[in-house]
Image (tube, rainbow, N blue to C red):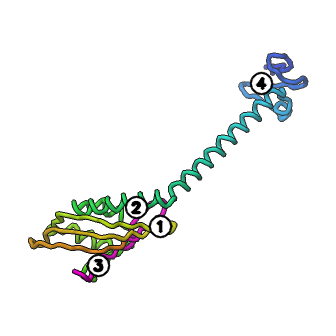
């Protein structure tokens, strides 16, 4: 069987002279000479595509960095944390364990009104108690302080409900500490205390 040779010198292929492409049994052999001998217009088009691609990649990188920086602006962080505080408050009121589980860090600790502390597990177990019926939870006078990936929230808290069939009511001051880890905000510590005037 003979090996046909395709002559790439014709204008149809727009290649420079002295380049032969040999085709054997469905395989092609292209030497570096073929790539080096591409018509200058094709080389320019290739360079333009590379330049456009680099420009697109650089633009996307700049946009991603700009978006990340915008998300870390104090006013955006404050709004995010206040939304998470409200989400936590609503989850506590309705006994939504899954939402609280996602908002509390694994090493979360809370100090409650009587001075005792609860871990994440203890806090969730307390809230899952079927004898606890929270009727009202209100936050007010909220102030947010941002410190990089840590945010401190202080404010007033009012809770009312039934515990083991007996009514209770708290009017507290609280401090919550939120941290951003792995791109996610979670509360790591919380402290509730009853003002001396009560």
Q: Could you tell me if the residues under marks 4 and 3 are in contact, i.e. CB atoms within 8 Å? A: no
Q: Is residue 171 above or below residue 67?
A: below
Name the element at disc 4.
strand
Give neighbour class at mark 2: few <14, some 14-19, many 20+ (Cα, 10 Å).
many
Q: Quadrant of residue 15?
A: top right
Q: Earlier in the sequence, mark 1 or mark 2?
A: 2
Q: As rendered, which of 32 and 131 lies closer to the eye?
A: 131
Residue at image coords 90%, 25%: 18
Name the element at disc 3.
strand
Q: As rendered, which of 51 and 191 lies closer to the eye?
A: 191
Separation (CA) of disc 1 from disc 2: 10 Å
Separation (CA) of disc 4 from disc 1: 68 Å
Residue at image coords 30%, 71%: 121
Separation (CA) of disc 3 from disc 1: 22 Å
Separation (CA) of disc 4 from disc 3: 85 Å
Q: Earlier in the sequence, mark 2 or mark 4?
A: 4
Question: Is the C terminus in the top left, top right, bottom left or bottom right quadrant?
Answer: bottom left
Residue at image coords 77%, 35%: 47
Residue at image coords 24%, 70%: 125
Q: Earlier in the sequence, mark 3 or mark 1?
A: 1
Q: Which residue is mark 3?
A: 193
Q: Which residue is mark 2?
A: 81
Question: Is the N terminus in the top left, top right, bottom left or bottom right quadrant?
Answer: top right
Give the main secondary structure of the magenta stretch: strand
Q: Which residue is mark 1?
A: 146
The span shown in magenta is 176-198
Q: Earlier in the sequence, mark 4 or mark 1?
A: 4
Name the element at disc 1.
strand
Q: Could you tell me if the residues under marks 1 and 2 are in contact, i.e. CB atoms within 8 Å? A: yes
Q: Which residue is mark 4?
A: 23
Name the element at disc 2.
helix
Please tell me whether mark 4 or mark 1 is closer to you in this view. 1
């Amino acid at each position: 069987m003979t090996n046909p040779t395709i002559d790439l010198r014709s204008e149809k292929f727009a290649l420079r002279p002295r380049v032969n492409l040999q085709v054997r049994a469905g395989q092609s052999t292209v030497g570096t000479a073929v790539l080096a001998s591409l018509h200058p217009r094709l080389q320019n088009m290739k360079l333009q595509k590379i330049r456009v691609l680099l420009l697109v990649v650089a633009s996307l990188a700049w946009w991603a960095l700009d978006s990340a920086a915008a998300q870390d602006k104090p006013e955006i962080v404050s709004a995010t944390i206040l939304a998470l505080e409200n989400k936590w408050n609503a989850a506590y009121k309705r006994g939504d364990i899954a939402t609280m589980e996602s908002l509390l860090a694994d090493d979360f600790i809370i100090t409650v009104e009587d001075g005792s502390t609860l871990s994440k597990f203890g806090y969730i177990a307390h809230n899952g108690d079927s004898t606890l019926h929270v009727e009202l939870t209100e936050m007010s006078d909220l102030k947010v302080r941002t410190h990089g990936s840590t945010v401190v929230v202080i404010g007033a808290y009012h809770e009312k409900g039934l515990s083991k069939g007996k009514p209770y009511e708290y009017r507290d001051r609280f401090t919550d500490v939120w941290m951003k880890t792995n791109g996610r905000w979670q509360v790591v510590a919380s402290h509730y205390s009853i003002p001396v005037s009560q």
